[in-house]
Image (tube, helix red, strand yellow):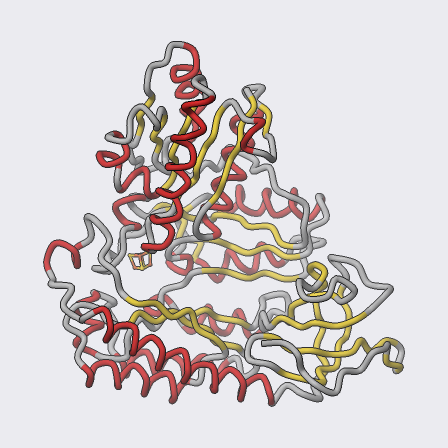
Amino acid sequence: MKIFLETFGCQMNEYDSELIRSILRSHQHTFVEQLDQAEVALLNTCAIRENAHERIYHRLDDLKGRKRRQKNLVVGVLGCMAQNLRQELAEHAPIVDIVAGPDSYKRLPLLIDAASGKGAKGFDFSLSEYETYSDIAPQRQPGVNAWIAIMRGCDNFCTFCVVPYTRGRERSREPQNIVAEAHRIAAEGFKQVTLLGQNVNSYRYEQSDFADLMESVAEVFGIRRVRFTSPHPKDFPRKLLHTMAANPKLCKHIHLPLQSGSDSVLDRMNRTYTRQEFLDLVDEIRAIIPEVSLTTDVICGFCGETDADFEETLGVMQRVEFDSAFMFKYSPRKQTIAERKFADDVPEEVKTQRLMRLIDVQREISKKRNAVEVGNVYEVLVEEPSKKNSDEWLGRTDQNKGVVFFDDAAKPGDFVQVRINAAGTNTLRGAVERNGWRRLPVQTECCVS
Ligand code: SF4
């Protein structure tokens, strides 16, 4: 059948969509780019943020109209939202024919057959203690970066988070299997691998820990850069930091989710570290990997967050000076501990004001941290044409900073030396340096945001 697959949410969902493509192609299904060419519409969904929910329901409303005109269209909802809101989605019948959680993708061919052949509905949201999809080779889109999921699920039960309920218990893949996938990726021409997991640095398989795995992947011929996301601050042993510092292929960027700078909020979030422990970890990371860039996630307006709690968060942001941050207002997610136990008692307008303050503070910090890069030369991996000007390239430094530059000889996947000559809040701008001379044009003003 002709399948239209749309992906919402995080990189893990993007990776799962690559697995879904592989599973369905092996059952002779094909994929189409346009919804109006499709016989089956699959939405691979996310349950983390409220706006992802809204976008998916909006999409389902579209499909409702389409299904009136195309009666045999099969509609499937997959992923975290399918797992989390199965009852609610089942009530969308007859719009939704298939509901399948993240551990049920191998049953998709059967579910599609059931829904399309006999009009029967196919629901499967069993969670597995073992499923890692390690026997499936994902069908990747061409590019410079390839994702590898090295583990699935999470055992941390942060009180605001649905992941332990939608993706089940934590389980790691065999290291040999991951390294074999990295060899295939390198043979396909990818230069960079990003190791993925909901709590990626708690990876462990028998005697092998995350640092061992990173080194093994970095040894793969053809792979020039290894990244990872998303780690938890509680899982940064010194061994991992020294491994990152010593190996030039391991990128010097750590996304270190803070979530809150207040001990009482961190406790209610069940983050298992204190403000001081987080600050000590930042100091240790910077002592061992001086060139590291640090980014973070912050939630404001969590249950019971007072003005003083929020000031503590701002204090940590000002003290650490993250290179950039993803900042969110708290909204309760169904089934989570926070939704069941705590009152969502910070008024919406207070959440909005706090978010605005966070964004303002972080914008100044990012600007300052980027400004000191002017004059430095970085090796940049060329990714794609710049969105604002397709004559220019967007690439990334080892520290994961975006750099816009002009080079008529470059192509995606190349590594070029770029001297930074202007800095904005989110992006750097530079000029290529090759054999001691500089390619045009050199910008005097920064026009990036
Ligand atoms: S570590 Fe916490 S926030 Fe991250 S996936 Fe696990 S429960 Fe969710």
Residue at 21% from the left image edge and 49% from the top image edge: 334
To which quarter of the image does residue 68 belong?
Answer: top left
Observer-nearest residue: 105 or 93? 93
Res 134 seen here:
yes
Q: Is residue 193 left or right of residue 329?
A: right
Residue at 42% from the left image edge and 57% from the top image edge: 200
Q: Is residue 179 left or right of residue 434?
A: left
To which quarter of the image does residue 112 belong?
Answer: top left
Q: Is residue 33 above or below residue 49?
A: above
Observer-nearest residue: 367 or 170? 367
Total labels: the figure holds 0
Quadrant containing the C terminus is bottom right
Res 287 seen here:
no
Quadrant containing the N terminus is top right
Percent x, y of residue 43: 43, 37
Rendered-image quarter of ligand 1:
bottom left
Residue at 60% from the left image edge and 35% from the top image edge: 33
Q: Is residue 406 above or below residue 153?
A: below
Q: Is residue 124 above or below residue 47?
A: above
Percent x, y of residue 273: 26, 73
